[in-house]
Amino acid sequence: MKRSKSLLIICLVIPILLISSCKKALVEKKPNILLICVDDLRPELKSFGAEYIISPNIDKLADKGVSFQRHYVNSPSCGPSRYTLLTGKYGASGNNALFLRSRKILKGEQVDPSMPEWFKNQGYTTISVGKVSHHPGGRGGVNWNDSTIIEIPNGWDKHIMPVAEWEHPRGMMHGLAHGEIRVKSSEMDVFQSVDGDDNIYPDGAITEEALKQLKRLTTYDEKPFFLAVGFIKPHLPFGAPKAYLDKYEDAEFPDIKHSNKPIGKTTWHNSGEFKQYNRWGKDPNNDGLFADEVRRHYAACVSYADAQVGKVLEELKRTGADKNTIVILWGDHGWHLGEHAIWGKHSLFEESLHAPLIIHDPRIKKKGFKTNAIVETLDVFPTLCELTGLDIPNFTQGVSLKKVLEEKDSVGHIALAYNNYAATLRTSTHRLVLHKDGFVELYDHSTNEKETNNIAYDYPELVEKLKQELQIKLDKKTKEI
């Protein structure tokens, strides 16, 4: 009788222990992270107000998550912008910002962990595919494939850059259809559209590798994963399969706002990156038909990139990991399409700094809303820490956006950006630009003039107040460098 009772107790207790153990395992399972980076993507998406753009996959993500309509990068160039994303700190203004940090590590200097390193140290498997740091694949050297020169030492368990017929990462970066590599930029067309499937351009290979890594991570790896996938388009030259250009055959694009070169001193940029390519002797600033062609090819590249994003998100859903994966879509900076007579980035105008940011956490109940809270790229690192339950490192200089994700009416905070010549502060109503020689620009975004009328001389008190706030941010940047 006693033995029977004992067996009965054991039979009752073991299932309870097993259930308790399973529940504990489920509770302790950290959410995965899928970070999708898109190069040179301004908020030219339907979910960000561009009704003429075909971007169904990114828009679907925005419908499930929170789209930050007023997200600003910290520098209008690939390298320094990705530095802030991947370190959570202000940094140098050049494209070599991460390599400068890497050199410090090699010299034995004390350097705070990068975002992937922080998550790796907390038990995550960290993998990057494509262009996540400035160089696709995260390596230096002549062809960007030297494994002794690493952009983010100690960060990724794997940093992968498939090159297919483009030979090496440098070839992929500026590649056109069927393995065409940029040798002499003036002999490479500024835009191109060729018949074929998605794999005739470089992002097709990046997508295929991303799908392989997702399958492996969700099938064989029991640890939570941090997978970063970086797509190259719509970076110059604007190349995408013809099927994507055909989508815009009858599209009507809005007039280019504020298309004249600014009068007076500004951070205007001469579009050198754009002008280095073959343009058949045409200038979009005085040739409306050519400007329209450029804009259509940029739109085609956006739709092509959107399709790659869709494939990755579909694979995530197929594996079932979407239920426990935080997804972030991030544009590394804006891009001018004729505003201020600029075709490119690098200025400190709104168009260079305004980029899309979407965050979807399947555990957050309030979904699918747009927020006008002003936020910075710098905020992504601490946000992911809080969402995954990790400590936010005290060296990060941004703020967590968890509250914004949960409360639609959050106001955000002022945003700093900089290049080699000036720094700017964006508030909810104004933009202040302070040049290194002391010259000041002040623009009122509540007016139709936006960033075409410098009102700094008319509002000296506001200028001084914003300069003080800007200096506080700049002091953090100077201390970091």
Image (cartoon, rainbow, N blue to C red):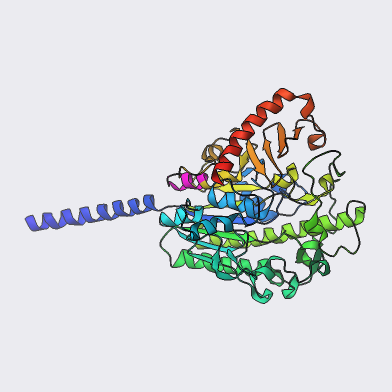
**Left or right of 223 on screen, residue 466:** right
Please tell me whether the stretch drawn in magenta is mainly helix, strand or loop.
helix
Who's the residue at 43% across and 68% down the image? 220
Could you say where residue 185 lies in the image, as x and y percent from the top left? 79, 67
Of all residues shown, which one is farthest toward the left?
1
Instruction: Pick the residue in front: 303 or 471.
Output: 471
Could you say where residue 377 lies in the image, as x and y percent from the top left? 60, 46
Who's the residue at 60% across and 58% down the image? 133
* The stretch drawn in magenta includes residue 59: no
Q: Is residue 1 visible?
A: no
Q: Is residue 219 visible?
A: yes
Instruction: Pick the residue in front: 142 or 337.
Output: 142
Could you say where residue 191 lies in the image, as x and y percent from the top left? 81, 63
* The stretch drawn in magenta includes residue 388: yes
**Left or right of 257 on screen, residue 54:** left
Question: In which quarter of the view is residue 34 placed?
Answer: bottom right
The magenta region covers 382-392
**Figure check: 183 above or below 252:** below
Who's the residue at 75% across and 34% down the image? 440
Instruction: Pick the residue in front: 375 or 340.
Output: 340
Could you say where residue 61 lies in the image, as x and y percent from the top left? 61, 51
**Left or right of 61 on screen, residue 253:** right
Of all residues shown, which one is farthest toward the top?
461
Instruction: Pick the residue in front: 32 or 72.
Output: 72
**Figure check: 123 above or below 388:** below
**Left or right of 14 on screen, residue 241:** right
